Amino acid sequence: MYCGIVGYTGLNYQSAPILLKGLQKLEYRGYDSAGIFVPDVADNMDQLVKEKGRVSELVDLVDRSDVSGTAGIAHTRWATHGVPSVENAHPQMSANERFYLVHNGVIENYLELKHKYLTDVPFVSDTDTEVAVQLVAKFVEDGLTTFEALQKMTSLLADNSAYGFLLMDDQEPDTMYVAKRKSPLLIGIGEDFNVVTSDALAMLDETHDFIELNDNEIGVIKPESVRLFNREGEEISREPFHVDIDASETDKGTYEYYMLKEIDEQPVAIRRMLDKYFGETGEILIGDQILNDIKAADRIYIVAAGTSYHSGLIGARMFESWSGIPTEVHVSSEFAYEQPLLSENPFFIFLSQSGETADSREVLQNVNRAGFKSLTMTNVEKSTLWREATYALPLMAGPEIAVASTKAYIAQVTLQAILAYALSDRIDLDLEQELSKIAVDIQAIVDDKAVFEKVANELLVPAHSAFYIGRGADADVSLEAALKLKEISYVQAEGFPAGELKHGTLALIEDGTPVIALMTQPKTAGLVRGNIAETQARGAEAYTITTKALAEPGDTGYVLPDVDPLLAPLLSVVPTQLLAYYTSLGRGLDVDHPRNLAKSVTVQ
Ligand code: M6R
């Protein structure tokens, strides 16, 4: 899954507080242990502090240990090889206590390397990372420099390995070595200091200027210099890019959880999109080249994972209905290894909040090898999927911290609507006006929090399982609604096309089973009503989320304003986000950090 890396080397400041603050900013990504290494030049002592559990516990431990020094590396670990424990936490240290390494990713052939090169070396952890740091130590003992040893170690890793490495050698206490393949790493540039991080958000208090490291490159970072080398060991140069995010956007403010803050930010996300993508006279500001390349394609393939995949299902409906371009939507982890027969001239759209999802990147690399054109829609500019696609468009949602994705979904649906509209000849819809109205309507829904808190507490908090049903675009939103509910409340939830109930799932309906029906599509609302009745006849507690035009007296449920049916998901998804949020809260769970999940999934 996803671990977090931060590193700092400077002339003037203590590194530990900066590194620990960085780790706190990375907490949202999910982790189960954390650690820090600081070389203390004054006392010629290495300080390695690790803790299983929360970063706050590591902070206490570091405070008690009087750690001092102006460089260091730190890590939040998500266990892959070996259980969460102090021994398995990073930094991992070489047996000669000279090298310290933090690592994101997975080394596929670590056991093979251990048996081939390290039979005499004592190991203290079960991690693949310890093998990597012991290899560096061994190659240095054999006569290589640290740089050469890192180069040699990375060259031995199986091609399907993923790594972001940040290494320190206690003989060079102001120097950090970085190397990466598949796992993101950025070098942040400062005055009299430089930083390393796997996520720019972690270091925005220090700098907004970053250089990205590409696959198979190595960097050597000192307080006043950054040197980059390609796979062949030749020095290369790369200009920094500026990250235009206000550090305060990553604060929770007065909210108890980021998720609620992010749900509340959805109207702003739509308005930012309107500012970015509509000109003063209503013209759409998406480059002609992108539009021409998509128009020239005979089929669009949307590729994504999780919530982003669900937003793609909605987008496909708009590309087909408005632009008349056949569109398929695929789960990236499936597409990567079971590629369907492609059309003659395909165009690929990658949807990803983080821009780092490994499954989607695998597909993008195949697409690039085949020479097809692609567009990434992502919330993180300069992310891997952003950089590697032919074109990229930003989602403008602002940092999304909660593991459960909310505002990125709204932004993805909005941006796909704008693109589909730009590709269409459809003139009977003023999209800009419609989206402005939707932003106002979402505001009204989020202002109704108390309604959803009550429904969640009565209907979902006590439930063992729950069902979301709908037809057409409502079936797509049902999938997202069920994912959100199960992800943060651990209620077994299923979302599916309402017509499928009687083909199997109806057997699960018992007295009191919650069935939430989405009914925003005039074409099929009558049929969904029939499906609700079928579940009620078997004892289900039905709740409807419908539009004003489709509501009927006697409905138990929430009524949304009327909206173009293809845009209805932008409204209907919001009550389902709030229901998930309050169910999680009502069950006393950590809403932002659901068990077993990480924000960004950078391994396959
Ligand atoms: O960053 P991405 O949009 O590529 O992430 C894809 C999924 O991992 C993500 O949407 C996941 O399903 C969310 N946690 C759902 O809330």
Image (spheres, grey):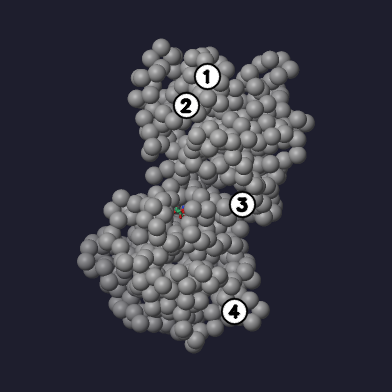
Q: Which amino acid does label 1 sit on?
A: Leu
* Mark 2 or mark 4, earlier in chain: 2
Residue 115 figure quarter:
top left
Taking depth in this image into account, of 448 and 84 the one nearest to the observer is: 84
Q: Quick one: SS at disc 1? A: loop
Amino acid type of the residue that numbered disc 4 sits on in the rendered structure: Glu
Of all residues, the one furthest to the left in this rendering is 503
Left or right, 189 with reference to 374: right
Q: Are marks 1 and 3 in contact (CB under 8 Å)?
A: no
Separation of marks 1 and 3 at Cα, in angstroms: 52 Å
**Element type at mark 2:** helix
Q: Residue at x 52, y 43 (%)?
A: 214
Residue drawn at x 41%, y 72% is 296
Mark 1: few, some, or many residues within 10 Å (few <14, many ≥20)?
some
Residue 363 x/y as whole percent? 38, 53
Element type at marker 3? Answer: loop
Residue denoted by label 1: 144
Residue linked to disc 3 = 256
What amino acid does circle 3 point to?
Glu
Quarter of the image with the C terminus is top left
Disc 2 marks which residue? 152
- Mark 2 residue crowding within 10 angstroms, few (<14) / some (14–19) / many (20+): some
In terms of sequence position, does the residue under pointer 1 or pointer 2 come before the other? 1
Tell me, for residue 128, which label it has, or none. none
Determine whether the residue tagged by mark 4 lies in a helix, strand or loop. loop
Disc 4 designates what residue?
Answer: 283
- CA–CA distance between discs 2 and 3? 47 Å
Give the camera-side residue of 232 and 373.
Answer: 232
Query: Disc 2 residue type?
Result: Lys
